[in-house]
């Protein structure tokens, strides 16, 4: 009797997994807002799955928070309808460091950044995902069209971002950028920029790529106090200026050149006054001319030295000289043969 043939039974092919969007949430002093935040993220996860076919994952980074935020998250996250990770910093390193930690630890197709205080609506994540999954954009940023903050806080924020646009990057929206989302390729490039004392948003715009702007209205803070103090804003502004522009050096050189020009005119006036007897104090003319002239020369020299130092500093950052957003190869079409007559 002929041997029986073994049937080659194969498992049915698995359906392709949905793309995943990981939302990174830095946490500092947000104990009271966490339950409402998790409820909002659950709604966003349902919206993403039903409308875009995108799964949501959450990456919470507790940045040395002095309250019970970590304990609250540890107790509530196992009951959430979406997967989540909880990472804790050894101390407070700042919200941008927490965002970097979350971006580095998460593995997804798209990445979003959201504040834990609910002032930026979590529903923005769905708009970000829609812009990114369409394939026309690599970065989506939230642009404030209004805010429900107290008048003093709103005014201070407008001043801050106005100075940022003027002295750091004019491409930043007028209301500034606090939340954004990006593709995996942009995430990889952003995490690779391992610079300290810099601006995360400045780096995001330095990378380039195709950006989409999603308007929203900033909500009033319901719980706790913001850790974004005036001192931190000033430090962030200085870090942004020194990391992305040589404007202070150029201003110093310009001031020096102006002093030299003024000293030449002043020297002519002092010499003329001396000749006509208008300078009774002996040695005043020479002292005034020398002080102005050499003071200006000194400022120009410091500006020139600063320009060389800036270029050396730029090289120590290790930023790539260029980034490619796409690469396509086109093969030459086959040349039709000519048939002999």
Image (cartoon, helix red, strand yellow):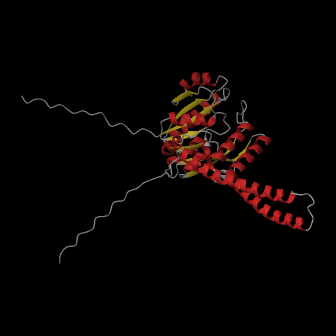
Where residue 166 sits: x, y (%)?
Answer: 70, 53
Residue at the spot x=26%, y=69% of the render? 336
Is residue 269 visible in the rendered image? The answer is yes
Q: Residue furthest left?
A: 1
Q: In terms of depth relative to the viewer, which is nearer, 194 or 186?
A: 194
The quadrant where residue 42 appears: top right
Q: In terms of depth relative to the viewer, which is nearer, 330 or 16?
A: 330
Q: In terms of depth relative to the viewer, which is nearer, 102 or 133?
A: 102
Q: In terms of depth relative to the viewer, which is nearer, 39 or 301?
A: 301
Please identify the quadrant where the N terminus is shown.
top left
Please identify the quadrant where the C terminus is shown.
bottom left
Where residue 133 sits: x, y (%)?
Answer: 50, 47
Residue at the spot x=85%, y=60% of the render? 285
Where residue 290 sits: x, y (%)?
Answer: 79, 57
Where residue 105 sits: x, y (%)?
Answer: 51, 33
Q: In this view, does 214 lie to the left or right of 221?
A: left
Q: Residue furthest front?
A: 282
Residue at the spot x=70%, y=47% of the render? 161
């Amino acid at each position: 009797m002929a041997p029986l043939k073994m049937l080659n039974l194969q498992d049915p092919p698995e359906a392709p997994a949905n793309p995943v969007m990981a939302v990174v949430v830095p946490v500092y002093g947000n104990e009271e807002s966490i339950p409402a935040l998790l409820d909002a993220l659950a709604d966003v996860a349902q919206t993403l799955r039903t409308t875009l076919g995108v799964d949501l994952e959450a990456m919470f980074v507790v940045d040395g928070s002095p309250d019970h935020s970590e304990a609250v998250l540890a107790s509530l996250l196992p009951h959430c309808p979406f997967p989540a990770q909880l990472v804790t910093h050894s101390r407070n390193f700042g919200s941008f460091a927490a965002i970097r930690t979350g971006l580095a630890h998460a593995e997804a197709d798209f990445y979003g950044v959201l504040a834990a205080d609910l002032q930026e609506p979590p529903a923005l994540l769905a708009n970000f995902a829609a812009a990114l999954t369409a394939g026309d954009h690599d970065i989506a940023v939230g642009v404030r069209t209004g805010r429900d903050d107290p008048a003093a806080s709103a005014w201070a924020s407008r001043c801050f971002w106005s100075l940022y646009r003027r002295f750091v990057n004019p491409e930043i929206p007028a209301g500034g950028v606090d939340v954004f989302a990006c593709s995996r390729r942009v995430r990889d490039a952003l995490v690779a920029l391992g610079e300290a004392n810099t601006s995360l948003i400045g780096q995001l715009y330095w990378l380039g790529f195709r950006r989409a702007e999603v308007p929203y209205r900033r909500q009033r803070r319901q719980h706790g106090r913001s850790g974004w103090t005036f001192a931190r804003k000033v430090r962030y502004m200085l870090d942004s200026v020194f990391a992305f522009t040589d404007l202070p050096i150029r201003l110093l050189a310009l001031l020096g050149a102006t002093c030299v020009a003024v000293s030449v005119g002043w020297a002519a006036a002092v010499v003329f006054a001396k000749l006509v007897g208008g300078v009774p104090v002996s040695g005043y003319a020479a002292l005034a001319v020398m002080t102005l002239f050499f003071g200006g020369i000194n400022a120009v020299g410091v500006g020139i030295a600063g320009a060389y130092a800036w270029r050396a500093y730029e090289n120590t950052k290790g930023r790539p000289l260029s980034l490619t957003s796409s690469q396509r190869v086109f093969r030459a079409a086959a040349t039709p043969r000519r048939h002999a007559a």
